[in-house]
Amino acid sequence: MRELVFNITAEHDGKQAYHYLRYCEHFSYALIVKMRHTENSLLLDGMPIRTIDRIKAGSVLKAYIPEGESYFTPNPDLKIDMLYEDEDIVVFDKPVNMPVHPSKNHQNDTVANFCAARYGNAKFHVVGRLDMDTSGIIVIGKHSHSAAVLTKNGGEKEYIAIVEGVLKEPSGTIDLPIDDSDPAVHKSFIAESGQPSVTEYETIATNGVLTAVRVRPKTGRTHQIRVHFAHIGHPLCGDELYGGRLEHINRQALHRGKMVFEHPITGKMLSFESPLPEDMQSLLEKIEKGSDKE
């Protein structure tokens, strides 16, 4: 059970514990409800209090985050490189061909199965999940509060993508709404009914057949980068779902290479980088040399 300690300052004197946790420390409503039903989850100067009780300046408020339970099957044979870990978060470099959560066709080979083997039945919370064939940095909250704060604050994500063709504008912004609300359709699409979606990009290199781009999504819609580039006529290489060909690579050529975000508890700025995996690095080198041959 994670213990968080808050020194109450004069500006928060007399506030209800609920108000302080919800609006000053960004605890989710669901978490506060769970704490209400967990004995001694809130202590003020060492004494148990209720969420409706008042806090006072100079006091120390301790909040104990109830642990959730995960029921994923542990698989100790899985390997994922770890970039960072502390009491609140863990940052992994996810490989290609590994889903985040189990599904019908992937019961035992996911990030969830890896975490079950590493952390037992403690519940993990993925922030900004990656598709199975998208590689790179993925952040996991070790408890619901760290995950909620990370989700709210977002941070900056940078990807490397390789798309088909040559972009008319070497850099720019794709601002098109994306709809992913139809459960009968297993992919997202551009529609006025969709949510605002913005993707910034800049060209790294092109050989006249393929183009490598650095991409910074400003929103986080499902398949956003893949949908945006496909819609403007430049699907990602290897992305069969959205019209890409397998001629140059056998998965969507998309890698989350950089993340910068504020630590959900300490507030410290963190930055992580992940090198391109071999398949994309090899393709990028061919593009930079002006070659489109395998």
Image (tube, rainbow, N blue to C red):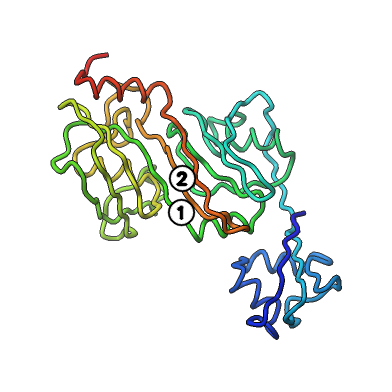
Q: Which residue is drawn at 52% across and 30% down?
A: 98
- Residue 80 as seen in the image, left or right of residue 288: right
Residue furthest out toward the bottom:
14
Q: Where is residue 22 in the image (x, y as percent from the top left)?
A: 62, 72
Mark 1 neighbour density, 10 Å: few (under 14) some (14–19) many (20 or more): some
Say if 274 sits above or below 128 in the image: above
Q: Quadrant of the N terminus?
A: bottom right
Label 2, on which residue?
Answer: 259
Q: Position of residue 249 (x, y in %)?
A: 33, 22
Q: Which residue is drawn at 55% across and 45% down?
A: 139
- Residue 102 as seen in the image, left or right of residue 171: right
Q: Residue at x 63, y 66 (%)?
A: 27
Judge by depth and name the residue closer to the eye, 264 or 32: 264
- Check disc 2 and give the amino acid type: Met
Mark 2 neighbour density, 10 Å: few (under 14) some (14–19) many (20 or more): many
Label 1, on which residue?
Answer: 155
Judge by depth and name the residue closer to the eye, 250 or 61: 61
Q: Position of residue 288 (x, y in %)?
A: 24, 24
To which quarter of the image does residue 144 belong?
bottom right
Dot 2 or dot 1: first in sequence order is 1
Q: Which residue is drawn at 67% across and 38% down?
A: 72
Residue furthest out toward the right:
47
Instruction: Work out how far the residue at label 2 is from the one at label 1, CA to CA, in angstroms.
Output: 7 Å
Judge by depth and name the residue closer to the eye, 222 or 181: 222
Q: Where is residue 120 in the image (x, y as percent from the top left)?
A: 74, 39
Q: Do the residues labelled 2 and 1 touch (CB within 8 Å)?
A: yes
- Residue 81 as seen in the image, left or right of residue 277: right
Disc 2, SS: strand
To which quarter of the image does residue 286 belong?
top left
